[in-house]
Image (cartoon, helix red, strand yellow):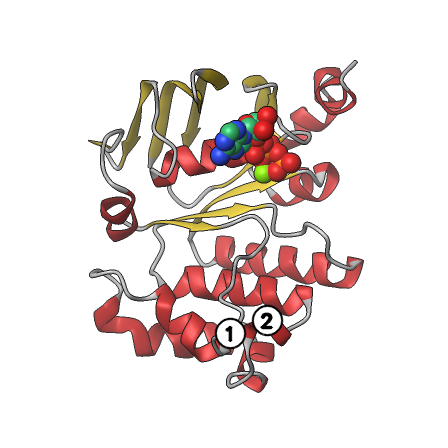
Amino acid sequence: MLEVHGLTAGYGGNPVLEDVRIEIGRGKLVGLLGANNAGKSTFINCLSGVVPASSGRILFEGEDITRLSPKSRVERGIIQVPEGRLVFPDMSVRENLLLGGVNATARPRRAERIDYVLDLLPRLKERIGQAAGTLSGGEQQMLAIGRGLVAEPRLLMLDEPSLGLAPRFVQYVFEIIDKLHADGLTVLLVEQNLNLTLRHSDYCYVLERGRVVVEGVSAHVKDDPRTKSAYLGL
Ligand SMILES: Nc1ncnc2c1ncn2[C@@H]1O[C@H](COP(=O)(O)OP(=O)(O)OP(=O)(O)O)[C@@H](O)[C@H]1O
Ligand SMILES: [Mg+2]
């Protein structure tokens, strides 16, 4: 579904990603692991078009999207759930969900999508009128995922959804991701949580200082000594 070839990107002439090659098959749950500053969010931002690629190519369902606007990518179903949730704090849960579906593709089915999200994440239903900024961190993560789902993703990109959550909520987030995967959604999961991500994903890439240093079926990545060294900087 997604092919990234030789992707290089950075900020103000400083490269962050160098020659990154990643593939995601339809219906797969693919993990992208890496320590702080590895370039994980930069990678997701390149896929969503917020950070431009300085070289390389991004193909989505056979189409070269490297130069497409973020809006066109959202309309093709490339949906990002950003690091740190970024819900709109003064708007209600319902308004945040509605905003997930403003793109031209999702808008006609927005009401049904919200019903689907509220069934999947019943906690949001209980808090539908509450200002998003008054939700707990875990509930805000649910809302950020829900908002992404209302956008009708074909590829859902989650940027560190377990960051800063209590263990119980981390478990819940991974259960939701498993459910989406089982329903056939294609997911790119960016995480620092090595063990949980390896356990839940089909295939994993490990990024170290902007380069892929390990890739493979998740069970194998776990046993590769380079995986640990990428984290510990050894
Ligand atoms: N908007 C920006 N302007 C300048 N430099 C940036 C910008 N965003 C990220 N960087 C730099 O790019 C590098 C990689 O950052 P990035 O956020 O992609 O890493 P990450 O793997 O997502 O880290 P974390 O796990 O902490 O979220 C860092 O050195 C960071 O300072
Ligand atoms: Mg990040």
Residue 101 showing in the rendered view: yes
| Image coords of residue 90 (percent x, y) | 51, 74
The secondary structure type at the circle numbered 1 is: loop
Q: Which mark is residue 133?
A: 2
| Image coords of residue 182 (percent x, y) | 50, 56
Q: Amino acid at mark 2?
A: Gly
Q: Quadrant of the N terminus?
A: top left
* 47 to 6, vertically: above or below: below
* 35 to 157, vertically: above or below: above
Q: Are marks 1 and 2 in contact (CB under 8 Å)?
A: yes
* 72 to 51, vertically: above or below: below
Q: Quadrant of residue 124?
A: bottom right
Q: Which mark is residue 67?
A: none
| Image coords of residue 140 (percent x, y) | 60, 66
The secondary structure type at the circle numbered 2 is: helix
Q: Residue at x 68, y 62 (%)?
A: 172
Q: Residue at x 77, y 63 (%)?
A: 168
Q: Which residue position holds label 1?
A: 90
Badge 2: how crowded within 10 Å, few (<14), some, or many (20+)? Answer: some
| Cα gap from disc 1 to disc 2, whole angstroms | 6 Å
Label located before the other in sequence (1 or 2)? 1
Q: Is residue 140 left or right of residue 234?
A: left
Q: Is residue 82 left or right of residue 207?
A: left
Badge 1: how crowded within 10 Å, few (<14), some, or many (20+)? Answer: few
